Amino acid sequence: MNGNNPYAGAPGVVGAGQPSSDVDDLSPAEVRRLRQAVSGIVAETRTYLPDSYAIGSELSHGSGGPRATVAVHPPVGHPVSAGLTPDADDLETGLSAEDCTEVARGLAASAAFQVMSTVGDDLTPTAR
């Protein structure tokens, strides 16, 4: 019965089974700007990596507000991801191009490092 009490929980926290109101806090223009910024990060990350790397994104709403995640799954090794939690100013004006480029380069470098650390230096050349 402990977890089923509808009156339990900290003040200000959405109760069990109740929808979060974070979605209502964003205007359609803010959502559009956030989607454009995230799609720009995905597109720029694709320019740094070969086609064998799978790249995707997701927009969600957490306890801290909207959250964007961009993930890269290299052909071998562990996937890497970057999470963005823009503040109110970023939602109004959009994410800066410098921030998007920094995230894209960091993801590409981390994904390439995953491949390099998985494969290692044990490869024998097939020809000289």
Image (cartoon, rainbow, N blue to C red):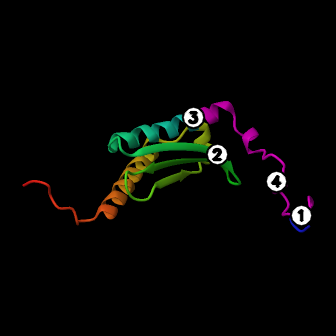
Query: Label 4's element?
Result: loop
CB of mark 4 within 8 Å of CB of mark 3? no
Quick one: which residue is furthest to the left in this view? 128
**Looking at the picture, does residue 98 appear above or below residue 123?**
above
Question: Residue 8: which disc?
Answer: 1
Task: Kindly identify the residue that appears in the image at 46 percent across and 55 percent down.
Answer: 80
Tell me the kind of residue under disc 1. Answer: Ala
Q: CA distance from mark 4 to mark 3?
A: 27 Å
Question: Which badge, 1 or 2, is on the more N-terminal residue?
Answer: 1
> Looking at the image, which is closer to me, 55 or 89?
55
- Disc 3 is placed on an element classified as helix
Q: Which residues are magenta?
A: 4-32
Could you say whether the residue bearing mark 1 is in a helix, strand or loop?
A: loop
The residue at which mark 2 appears reads as 60
- Please tell me which of labels 4 and 3 falls first in the chain: 4
Question: What number is the disc on residue 14?
Answer: 4
Name the kind of residue labelled 3 in the image: Arg
Residue pushed farthest bottom? 2
Type of the residue with mark 4: Val
Label 2 vs label 4: CA separation?
Answer: 16 Å
Place of residue 45 in the rendered image (x, y in percent of width and height, measured from the top left): 40, 43
**Residue 12 magenta-highlighted:** yes
Query: In the rendered structure, are the residues bearing label 2 and label 4 in contact, judged by CB atoms less than 8 Å apart?
Result: no
Observer-nearest residue: 61 or 76? 76
- Left or right: 101 in relation to 68: left
Cα distance, mark 1 to mark 4? 11 Å
State which tag comes first along the sequence, 2 or 3: 3
**Which one is in front in this view, the residue at disc 1 or the one at disc 3?**
1
